[in-house]
Image (tube, rainbow, N blue to C red):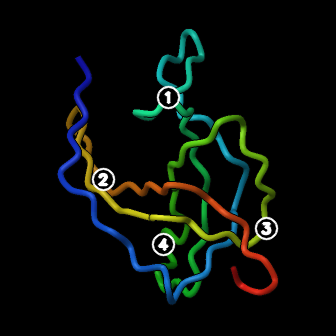
Amino acid sequence: MIKEVVVRNIPVDTSQLTFMVAGEPEPRILDRQTGEIKKDAEGRELYMIPLLPQPNDDRRNPIIWVTFPSEDFPRISQGIKVRPVGLTAFYWSMNGRSGLGFRAEAIRPVTETGA
């Protein structure tokens, strides 16, 4: 049995950061055999997107993968600047592995006015 333990969600202050999309969004797969996509409590499909926070002084692992819900497959182009709404970090542990993950309520493109 696979058991995922989320210890605590920690809000991330993004006011001094910008984020650039570093790749295409990917669905969070629940069942690899059926291709079923994992869903949140409201029934929305969950996707992951690689983001490059700037400024970033961690040259070893500059990209973070952020999970977010979407009603349909998100069309977010690589290279554009985005704003992760409600970004939180969390610690996870599963089957002897552990790490730091990121979730957002939404991923929004940054307009020229910075909105």
Q: How far apart are the two marked residues, 2 and 3, measured between alpha carbons?
A: 26 Å
Instruction: Pick the quarter of the image with the C terminus.
Output: bottom right
Give SS at disc 4: loop
Residue type pointed to by label 3: Gly
Which marked residue is nearer to the observer: mark 2 or mark 3?
3
Q: How far apart are the two marked residues, 2 and 1, measured between alpha carbons?
A: 26 Å
Q: Position of residue 99 (x, y in %)?
A: 30, 53
Q: How far apart are the two marked residues, 1 and 4, measured between alpha carbons?
A: 36 Å
Q: How far apart are the two marked residues, 1 and 3, measured between alpha carbons?
A: 29 Å
Residue in the picture at 57% in, 56% down: 106
Badge 3, how many Cα within 10 Å: few under 14, some, many 20+?
A: some
Instruction: Tell me if 69 is positioned left or right of 10 in this view.
Output: right
Residue type pointed to by label 2: Gly
Which marked residue is nearer to the observer: mark 2 or mark 1?
1
Instruction: Pick the quarter of the image with the N terminus.
Output: top left
Q: Position of residue 21 (x, y in %)?
A: 69, 64
Q: How far apart are the two marked residues, 4 and 2, measured between alpha carbons?
A: 15 Å
Give SS at disc 1: loop
Q: What residue does disc 3 label?
A: 79
Q: What residue does disc 1 label?
A: 43
Q: What residue does disc 4 label?
A: 60
Residue in the picture at 57% in, 10% down: 34
Give SS at disc 3: loop
**Which sits earlier in the primary sequence, circle 3 or circle 4?**
4
Q: What residue does disc 2 label?
A: 99
Residue in the picture at 53% in, 17% down: 32
